[in-house]
Image (cartoon, rainbow, N blue to C red):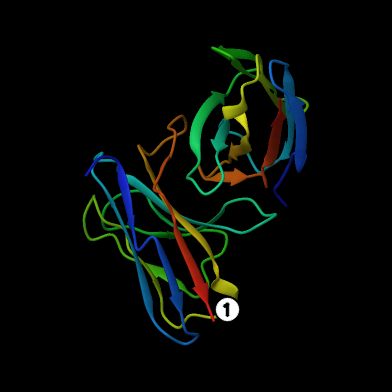
Amino acid sequence: IAGITQAPTSQILAAGRRMTLRCTQDMRHNAMYWYRQDLGLGLRLIHYSNTAGTTGKGEVPDGYSVSRANTDDFPLTLASAVPSQTSVYFCASSIAGAFNEQFFGPGTRLTVL
Amino acid sequence: GQNIDQPTEMTATEGAIVQINCTYQTSGFNGLFWYQQHAGEAPTFLSYNVLDGLEEKGRFSSFLSRSKGYSYLLLKELQMKDSASYLCAVMDSNYQLIWGAGTKLIIKP
């Protein structure tokens, strides 16, 4: 692994189904983030984690949950998907703190029908 | 509320110079970032400003005025590969990034 990876690349999901988006980084960054990106809107923070074992809510957390059992992995779960969760999801990581650029994964394109 | 404004789309000619503006209103300020995002790809870091003034990095420069809540990204000697969206983001008092919707830059030959 080099950098930050996400799986799956894309997914079509029936409404009401449960889905977990995976994110793994090998840069030993302490902070990780989940964003969604929708046309015409900026990236919006869903959940974040400043260190393993802790998580926090971002701007749009409803309908999503996360866990941070270790430094490398930060999965995002949709408990019961709805069509409004159709979006491109990006995972990112950084060294926590003011000036620290975030490194992004390649994204997961999710369609909920 | 928190708000980041940038133009939706700009067009420029190969070899020319273009300036992409960003204005912001946020709760606290811990720096302003510019990212580049090619269509279908992830954002990648371009620049960071926390003090007023101009930061130059090759063909790209970024300017910040904290008193005016204003930044711009200046791209010189435009190349076709610079066709992308440019995202402005401000780190707020909670050290979270607040993102603008992005400016789609179209480069014409």
Residue in view at x 76 percent, y 43 percent: B8
Residue in view at x 61 percent, y 22 percent: B79
Is residue B63 toward the left or the right of residue A73 in the image?
right
The amino acid type, in three-letter code, at marker 1 is Pro
Residue B77 versus residue B31 in the image, above or below: above
Is residue B45 toward the left or the right of residue B34 in the image?
left
Residue A111 versus residue B32 in the image, above or below: below
Residue B53 versus residue A104 in the image, above or below: above
| Residue occupied by mark 1 | A83
Residue B76 versus residue B72 in the image, above or below: above
Where does residue A73 sit, x and y in percent of width and height?
Answer: 26, 56
Nearest the viewer among B84 and A17 is: B84
Label 1: element kind: helix
Please state the chain letter of the residue tagged with numbered disc 1 in the rendered image: A
Quadrant of the image occupied by residue A37: bottom right
Residue in view at x 56 percent, y 45 percent: B39
Quadrant housing the C terminus of chain B: top right
Is residue B87 toward the left or the right of residue A69 in the image?
right
Residue in view at x 46 percent, y 29 percent: A99
For this orientation, the residue located farthest to the front is B109
Where does residue B66 sit, x and y in percent of width and height?
Answer: 70, 25
Where does residue B31 sit, x and y in percent of width and height?
Answer: 57, 30
Nearest the viewer among B86 and B78 is: B78
